[in-house]
Amino acid sequence: MLNDSNINILGSANNYPYPDSSNSAIFFAYATPRGIGSPQNSPNIPLALTGMTALENFFKNAGIPPRARETPKALTHFQDDRVDEYYWLRDRDSPETIDLLNRENEYTKRVTSGLEGLEDQLFLEIKGRIKETDLSVPVRKGNYNYFAKTQEGLQYPMHARKRIGSETEEILVDENDEAFGHSFFALGGLAVSPSEELAAILSDTDGSELYKLTVRSIASPSYIKAQLEECYYGLAWSLDSLSVFYTKTDRQMRPYQVWRLDLQSGQSELVFQEDDAGYFVGIGTTKDDKFIAIESASKTTTQIFTIDAAAPLTRPVPFSERVKDLEYSIEHWKDRFFVVSNRDNPDFSLMVVEEGVNDHLKWEPYLETSEAVRLLDIEVFADFMAIQERHLATTRLRVVDLRSKNIFEVEKSEEVSTIDIGENEEFESKILRYEYASMITPRSVFEIDLETRQSTLLKQSEVLGNFDQTRYKTFRVWADARDGTKIPISVVCRSDLQASEIGYPALIYGYGSYEHSIDPAFSSARLSLLDRGMLFAFAHVRGGGEMGRAWYMDGKLDRKTHTFTDFIDCTQTLIESGWADRSKIAARGGSAGGMLMGAIANMAPELYKVIVAEVPFVDCLTTILDPSLPLTTFEWEEWGNPVTDESIYELMKSYTPYENVAQTQYPFMLVTAGLNDPRVSYWEPAKWVQRLRVKTINPRVILKTEMGAGHQGPSGRYDAWRDEAFVYAYLLSALGLA
């Protein structure tokens, strides 16, 4: 179903699939322009503003859209009867289902055929800003520097290393080779053994997020030590390099087991199993490689088990007993553990405990907590610790000298920006790698000397062409929600635009679930919209984590509707403050953010000219009621359990997009799906589109399904750029700007 998360491939807290990561972010929002003069030396792209948009004509000329067979199925719960006329679409093995999805794709092509020239132009603009042959900043671990590189014309990166002092390059994984013969490829994990001789690789070729685990020699890649099918995220090595730990899922796609692969015998043994359906299991190692950590966690409760990495055959030891609503993470340091936990503070605090003490009541506070500051993560070194925090919808980094407890904050140049801990593999290092970006500053990799506090820029993602940062500006607007809460909005636009009586075409992005924060970040692709005079905004609505744990709690369970009303209130604020043109507003969101798109379409269809809902979770009530579907029981702590709680059932029924389609005029809509999506099943957007067509006035909706991919859409970078150009073309046309 959902549980959107990042994938850690090379040990970084933030994984970027390509050296220019900003161009791979498919779930970022974008904005739309007004035909005014461009800044000096910036592209002056004419816009055709007409009474009737070209897209309206395209819909009229595309013929009759696909209609699915209506076979009403009664769904009864708490004596409440609902009817789902498209329930049968859940049968993905049915030729009729596949035929409908194919016909939907054909209809989408007909509707958008007139946009192909614009799409091509946008694709060339996006591609033209990217340094296609590029190299990431090397990261040292042990005797090697590790890096990723891309090559012009190739869809995927290569992961490689060089021994310190040598120029000889060793390829760990060439994703292009792994992807050969497949329309989709995703690297789910890459872990090098402590001996530095072997690589464990997780690969997915259909988007299902079930991975093949391959362990092979780095020096002789054709020498495969082991291969296993249907594994999940997470890899950990024993110190002797003879055991690899990995995870497996149950039938509901819940990771619930940890297995140990013995490379000498080629046999695997079960190490840990979580029987509570509300918990997910993950695996990793501490930074010093001394402990393998198994985390079993629900949405509100964590329990960690450790295994001495030097004794991989020993049983996992609980770090603490399981305590309801106690959440924590750990990092080993010398003879103790640092613990980040909500035990004493809902926004988490830093604690410490001696190694071998397995009692959460004996965790001792290490630093004083700060009000309204959310502690996110730590990076431990021999003498220092980096602390990542969030305050007022922005991130910050502080560094603690573990010898004196003196603290300093890493400086950043812009208020509306994002600073993150980067890749730091060496425990004894006195250098902290960190990353910085804003909506006008490309992703930048820095190192700071923790003794002298001097920062050095190692690399900033290069934007080709005539990019000039001074042509753009970023700022924050605060919206007044209907209950008086202040909602932050991060905005970027051309620097010559000023608030006016009419405002500018705007695209607003939202998510607002799982305490996931949408932080201000750069996208070179987005420049194609900004240069046309468009305004782009992130609405940091409740349900996300931008303003701390209370912000998340105020947008989940029985308060979920705050997520939807906040987004609408943010839209109104941008209009009333003179930044957004009331007649030219677009909205975009994916996954749980796609549910947000469905909700605002039902609640305020007149407010938006076009909505892009990517892999949207729109049939959430029916899905959450069915424990047999992937990930359902795990989600009850996020949305509530409508199976047993009638009030939650009624609440979800009141906002579920599929249940609340109205007989009114909806915006232009672009909906996407992935046939192999394990998080949001393809039938949710497919059914929703059918109901929109039947029940609404003048329906203008298309469905684009990736028939060989999953939740993340196209996997190759050129395919992703092409897909983004397609979305841009649709938006521009819907807004009457092309």
Image: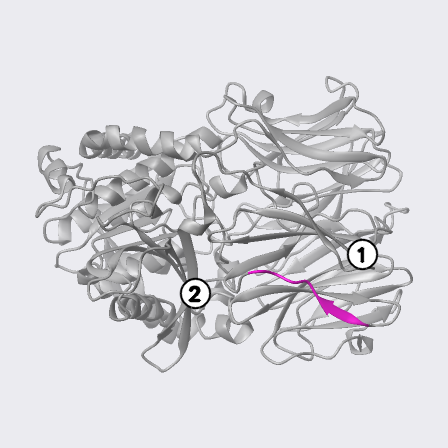
* Observer-nearest of 580 and 467: 467
Spatial CA distance of label 1 from label 2 is 36 Å
Q: Does residue 111 lie above or below 393 as drawn?
A: above
How far across and how far down the image is residue 370, in percent? 65, 79
Residue that mark 2 sits on: 540
Q: Which residue is pictured at 19% across the width and 40% down the height?
A: 69
Magenta segment includes 411: yes
Q: Is residue 607 left or right of residue 414?
A: left
- Magenta: main secondary structure equals loop
Q: SS class of the residue under badge 1?
A: strand
> Which of label 1 and label 2 is nearer to you?
2
Question: Would you place residue 511 above or below residue 87 in this image?
Answer: below
**Visible residue check, residue 350:** yes
> What mark, if any, has residue 317 been given in the picture?
none
Above/below status of 178 relative to 317: above
**Quadrant where the C terminus is found in the figure:** top left
Mark 1 neighbour class, 10 Å CA radius: few under 14, some 14 to 19, many 20 or more:
many
Q: Residue at x 41, y 72 (%)?
A: 487
Magenta-colored stretch includes residue 598: no
Residue 306 shows which numbered tag?
A: 1
Name the image quarter holding residue 102.
Answer: top left
For the record, the magenta segment spans 406-413
Residue 714 drawn above or below residue 216: below
Q: Local crowd at mark 2 within 10 Å, few (<14), some, or many (≥20)?
A: many
* Rendering quarter of residue 481: bottom left
The residue drawn where x is 56% and y is 41% is 461
